[in-house]
Image (tube, rainbow, N blue to C red):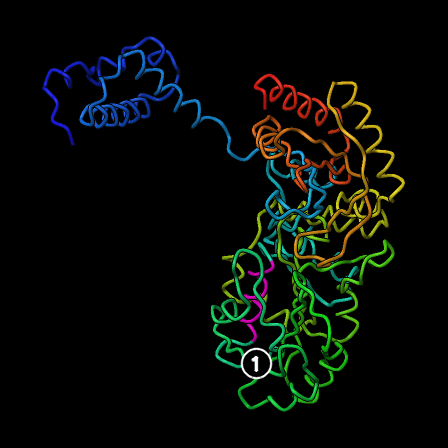
């Protein structure tokens, strides 16, 4: 570090002097925040002087502090137009919510609600009762509760029903789920001991039966929702697993991961296990997500038979991972769409999945015409949309893409991400591709505006 003469440091203003700058004094921010940022900025300025840089002026320091204030004041969580074609995009917040779910969540947020109050009895109630009847009606289960996500649901189930005991899991199902969380690690946190059965590619019902001991509490079926194993493979049916569990006096659990109340094959996709199928097969407890194929807010849902569900409800962990009034309202509103038979029309995830190839071409043609009118060179090409979110791995839906060929697709994509709202597209073979399937109703004109602004901004820069 270079030694600097003392007068170089004296050129820097004091904290008090800097705080008297009109722009800071009238900024409206709390004095404590202004003082803290001013001290930090002066510390950084002294380090620069020590490294041979000239002392910053009062105006430069004040401008830097104001820039930091502006940055701190801007929300970092903001809306994004998803033009990537990935329907349940984990990094973009997974399932967008229906208008009814949003309204329900807003309604209970604006004042008080009967979250844990029985209005008929005038006494304390249970927050779980707001969704239990709906879950039972839709799934065929005898009880149901909602927690904050499916990983938490699995931890709760194992903690309540198998802590200190063994749980049998097929070796091919000891998978890693999103964010680096692995089923063995989740089980370890619950206090249950994982016992591998079978082999990676082939596991039979007899493998479970042979592994049962006096220490075994349950067998667990884990749906491989984020990968697909093909070739020389075998897994027992749910009915076979239930038969082993009943014959051995242990519980049968099913972690569906995504979970669904609709048949995915009606849209040309592979079959995604449905919640009601698991219940009908006789599984004692089933867990699944609320924000994937269900199409609601982030949640973990547990349905099952009365006796194990009663033990789960009483477990202390329930309070630690319970959801608040807004999530319950959103889940309830989403479940009501299924009850009323309107899920395909009302729930965005299923509306996007159910859109036909001809509808996609019509939407893409309209957007391309708007972009061309705005001076953006683009063409249409065939492509595929992905369900995403650890659901239906490898399954895609035919779509029509809008292809742009700028000098640099990466620079254009970066510029789109910097917009307000940001636009997330995808890049393939040097082209920037926009998939209309995941562009929500009412976002088309805004998408065109953002793409045109980014396109012409790069043209001006010569990029």
Rendered location of residue 417, percent (x, y): 59, 32
Q: Position of residue 377 (x, y in %)?
A: 74, 25
| Figure check: 272 above or below 436 | below
To which quarter of the image does residue 34 belong? top left
The structure residue drawn at horizontal position 73% and vertical position 50%, both measured from the top left corner, is 386
What residue sits 79% from the left and 60% below the top?
A: 137
Foreground pick, 432 / 250 = 432
- Give the magenta range: 150-161
Residue 211 sits above or below residue 357 on the image: below
Task: Residue at 74% x, 18% y: name it.
Answer: 375
Classify the position of the C terminus by image quarter.
Answer: top right
Q: Mark 1 points at which residue?
A: 196
For this view, does 198 lie left or right of residue 65? right
Residue 157 magenta: yes
Q: Which residue is drawn at 66% across and 29% down?
A: 406
The answer to whether 51 is drawn above or below residue 328 in the figure is: above
Q: How crowded is mark 1: few (under 14 residues within 10 Å), some or many (20 or more)?
A: some
Main secondary structure along the magenta-highlighted residues:
helix
Q: Does the magenta stretch include residue 78?
A: no
Query: In the image, residue 394 lies at what x, y percent?
Result: 72, 58
- Farthest residue to the left: give it: 6
Q: How many marks?
A: 1
In front of the other: 309 or 396? 396
Query: For numbered disc 1, what is the local secondary structure?
Result: strand
- Left or right placement of residue 26 versus residue 372 in this view: left
């Amino acid at each position: 570090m270079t030694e600097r003469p003392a007068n170089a440091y004296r050129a820097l203003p004091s904290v008090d002097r800097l705080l008297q700058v009109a722009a800071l004094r009238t900024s409206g921010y709390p004095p404590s925040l202004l003082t803290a940022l001013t001290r930090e900025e002066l510390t950084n300025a002294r380090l620069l002087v020590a490294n041979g840089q000239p002392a910053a002026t009062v105006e430069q320091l004040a401008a830097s502090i104001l820039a930091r204030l502006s940055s701190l004041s801007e929300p970092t969580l903001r809306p994004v137009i998803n033009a990537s074609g990935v329907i349940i995009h984990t990094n973009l917040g997974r399932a967008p919510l229906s208008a009814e779910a949003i309204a329900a969540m807003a309604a209970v947020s604006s004042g008080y609600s009967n979250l844990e109050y029985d209005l008929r009895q005038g006494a304390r109630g249970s927050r779980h009762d707001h969704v239990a009847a709906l879950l039972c009606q839709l799934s065929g289960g005898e009880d149901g509760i909602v927690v904050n996500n499916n990983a938490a649901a699995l931890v709760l189930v194992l903690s309540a029903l198998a802590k200190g005991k063994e749980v049998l899991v097929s070796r091919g199902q000891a998978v890693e789920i999103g964010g680096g969380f692995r089923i063995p690690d989740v089980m370890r946190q619950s206090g249950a001991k994982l016992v591998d059965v079978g082999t990676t590619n082939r596991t039979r019902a007899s493998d479970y039966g042979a592994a049962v001991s006096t220490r075994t509490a349950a067998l667990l079926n884990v749906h491989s929702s984020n990968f697909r194993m093909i070739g020389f493979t075998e897994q027992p049916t749910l009915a076979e697993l239930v038969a082993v569990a009943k014959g051995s006096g242990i519980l049968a659990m099913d972690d569906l991961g995504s979970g669904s109340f609709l048949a995915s094959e009606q849209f040309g996709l592979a079959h995604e296990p449905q919640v009601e199928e698991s219940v009908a097969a006789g599984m004692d407890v089933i867990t699944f997500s609320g924000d994937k194929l269900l199409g609601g807010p982030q949640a973990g849902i547990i349905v099952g038979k009365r006796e194990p569900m009663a033990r789960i409800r009483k477990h202390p962990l329930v309070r630690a991972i319970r959801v608040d009034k807004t999530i319950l309202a959103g889940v309830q509103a989403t479940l009501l769409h299924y009850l009323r038979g309107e899920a395909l029309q009302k729930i965005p995830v299923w509306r996007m999945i159910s859109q036909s190839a001809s509808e996609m071409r019509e939407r893409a043609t309209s957007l391309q015409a708007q972009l061309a009118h705005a001076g953006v060179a683009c063409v249409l090409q065939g492509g595929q949309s992905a369900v995403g979110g650890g659901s239906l791995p490898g399954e895609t839906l035919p779509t029509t893409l809008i292809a742009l060929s700028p000098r640099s697709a990466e620079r254009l994509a970066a510029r789109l991400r910097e917009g307000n709202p940001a636009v997330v597209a995808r890049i393939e073979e040097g082209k920037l591709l926009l998939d209309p399937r995941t562009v929500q109703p009412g976002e088309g004109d805004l998408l065109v505006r953002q793409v045109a602004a980014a396109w012409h901004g790069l043209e001006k820069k010569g990029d």
